[in-house]
Image (tube, helix red, strand yellow):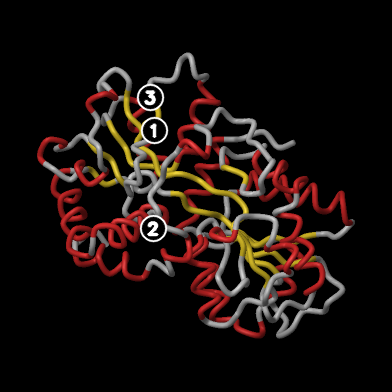
Amino acid sequence: MYPLSRRALLKGAALGGAALAAGPALIAAASRPARAADGPLALYNGQHRPPVEALIAAFTASTGIEVAVRHGSSAQLASQLMEEGAHSPADVFWSEESPSLFALAEKGLLAPLAAGTLAAVPAEYSAKDGTWIGATARCRVVVYNKANVDPATLPASVLDFASEAYADRVAFAPASGAFQQQIMAVMILKGREAALAWLKGLRQYGRVYNSDSAAVEAVESGDIPIALSNNYYWQALAREIGEADVQSAIYNIGHGDPGTLITVSGGGVLKSAKNAEAAQRFVAFMVSEEGQKAIVAAIAEYPLRPGVTSPFPLTPFGELDPAPVTPNELGDAEAALALLREAELA
């Protein structure tokens, strides 16, 4: 088992603007126009490292298949895969977020997954055309400082934070892919003009941070009372500090509000994969009982395979009452980027 490391999560979160890192085998493979099929399975990884390392260890132990990994942000790697096209050395893409998988599917770069693989998780968390699958889910939450905020006073909607009543009290990370998916959810449920007004309000009254993890750290230190974040950043902080000593807590808005949005991390097989059979086995392993247990032991995300539970003290999945928006409806999130530019946040 790989223990959760907040440092590893922070390192992963910082990859958005960093140069890509690749294992020696994959660097060598990338220098050739086409990689031989007898090398290690080539994984382009946009997910945090702890769950990926845990799954690879379990997969290699189970199958004997070695895996070479290239790490980066999901958006960076998806762009690279589009540039590489049929000459890509990648066999599998593991994305932290569904929009990058959606974009590759729209470009026709992903192969259909096996029916048995797709059947392992509920259909709403996978591609409609069967080319990618959600492996784990995370939830958008509100993190608050317990000394400065009474949770009973928190608003009924995430949209309410974009108001003068919360001036300089709310942290958010517009560069975060998860925040951009939340923008999409607001657009779908409330309309484009409401989403734009929300962003303009956050720009005027909120405070911008470089990442969700930085925003959660700021709440914990008392620098700001409230942050919009994914749940697992707080879970990592609480595990490191100890829940008895942590100064912040999670608030789930619920009742179908876009403040409680379920997003997924998942994988797909490249149509150009040279190790296509091994690639299909790897993605199938991601959603197997053994694979799901390995992943959720390393990060506080929700397993999507029924019957598997997380060892973290998460709010039960069935009690979240999230926004009724599926990963497919979020699309490639390009509309969110346009709104961020219009609101002068990008």
Residue 150: image x %, image y %?
A: 26, 21
Query: Distance between the Cα atoms at labels 2 and 3?
Result: 24 Å
Residue in view at x 53 percent, y 32 percent = 314
Q: Residue furthest top?
A: 244
Check if mark 1's residue and mark 3's residue have beta carbons within 8 Å. no
Which amino acid, mark 1? Glu
Of residue 105 and residue 322, the one placed in the foreground of this image is 322
Label 1 belongs to which residue?
217
**Mark in the foreground, 2 or 3:** 2
Q: Quadrant of residue 273?
A: bottom right
**Mark in the foreground, 1 or 2:** 2
Question: Which class describes the residues within 10 Å of circle 3: few (<14), some (14-19), or many (20+)?
Answer: many
Label 3 belongs to which residue?
248
Eyeballing the image, is 24 above or below 28? above
Element marked by disc 1? helix
The circle drawn on residue 181 is 2
| First-in-chain label (1 vs 3) | 1
Residue 252: image x %, image y %?
A: 38, 35
Of residue 290 and residue 9, the one placed in the foreground of this image is 290
Left or right relative to 168: residue 149: right
| Image quarter hosting the N terminus | top right
Query: Distance between the Cα atoms at labels 1 and 2?
Result: 22 Å
